Every structure is written in structure tokens, then in C-alpha cells.
Amino acid sequence: MTRKKSHKKINDKKNIINLTPNLNQITMKKIIIAILIFVGFQGFSQEKKAKIEFKQTEIDYGTINKNADGTRVFEFTNTGDAPLIINRVKSSCGCTVPSKPTKPIMPGKSDKIVVKYNTHRAGPFRKTITVYSNASNNVVILKIKGKVVDPNAVNLKRKTASPVIKANK
């Protein structure tokens, strides 16, 4: 018994033309379904974000003595709903050295950024510390200011008191 193989040959241009839109329609349907699934998951999964809130963003040292302790603390809280990661803390100059937490700060928890200003030079100062994190407010600017005085320095200002001349009677 011999079996005949049946092959359908599409020689007709009309059939070839009709097959092409079907392939395009199938591809488009797959793309549309993929987009709808992606958008659907985006709508259902709200992204959790950390948020950093500082108790204060500026510290005024006031007037401090030369070579005094220039260490100050900026306290903050993660008020978001995801772990907060402090990526980098950068000061505006080398005379200010900030240190950051090394571990993530969980939602609702607090931590600190310690800033040490080198008080070896007398005079007023105003510095910025930039905090970079994964928070929704991912860049925060902190400021320090004050005046360093040298208590051992000689005051060279002249006093302008008028001389008193006593008359002889």
C-alpha cells in the first residue's frame, strides 16, 4: 500500500497575500498583550521608596575657639516605606569631613551624619555637605556656618579714646 503525501503548494498570489496579514496580526497581538501585562503589573505594584527627613539642615556653630572640637551631628529619619541607603556624602571643601552610615536605615528608623569642621584657621566659615541617597528626595544639602576666633591673638585695633588733659589750678 502506497501512501500519497499531500503537500499543499501555495502558488496563488492571493493566498500568499492573505497569509502575510495573519502573521502580522499575530505578532501585533502578542506585542499588545505583552504591553498590557507590563502596564497591569506596574499599576498593581506600587514602588516603595525611602524618604530622608533631617531634624535640621543647617547648624550654626556660633563663635568657637581656634582648635576647638568642630564635630556636629545631623540627625535624620527614614520616613519612607523602603530601606534608605546613603550612597555618598560630600563636603564643599577638605576642611569639612562628613561620615555616613554604612548600613541601610529601615523605615521609621533614625541615624546620623557626623560632620567635623577643622577649626585650625580663625575666621568666619560657611560650608555645604551634600547627601546622596536612594530616597525620593535623593539629594539633600546640609549647611554649617560659624566663626572661629583665636583667643591668644593680639588685638591690633586701636582704641579711640580721647586724651584727657588736666588743667593746673
Image: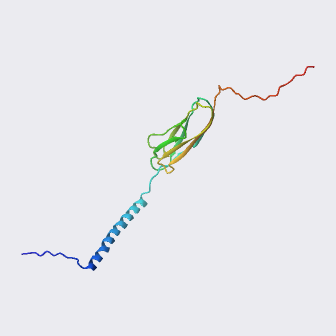
Please say whether residue 89 is visible from this viewpoint. yes
Q: In which quadrant is the C terminus drawn? A: top right
* Percent of width and height locating residue 41: 40, 60
Q: In which quadrant is the N terminus drawn? A: bottom left
Query: In this rendering, is residue 18 above or below 112?
Result: below
Query: In this rendering, is residue 5 above or below 158?
Result: below
* Percent of width and height locating residue 65: 62, 30
Residue nearest the viewer, comparing 66 with 93: 93
Q: Is residue 151 left or right of residue 49?
A: right
Q: Residue at x 36, y 64 (%)?
A: 34
* Percent of width and height locating residue 127: 58, 40
Q: Residue at x 8, y 75 (%)?
A: 2
Q: Residue at x 34, y 67 (%)?
A: 30
Q: Is residue 17 left or right of residue 45?
A: left
Residue 10 position by quadrant: bottom left
How many marks overall? 0
Residue placed farthest to the left in the image?
1
Query: In this rendering, is residue 65 above or below 83?
Result: above
Residue placed farthest to the top in the image?
169
Residue nearest the viewer, comparing 62 with 89: 89
Please say whether residue 60 is visible from this viewpoint. no
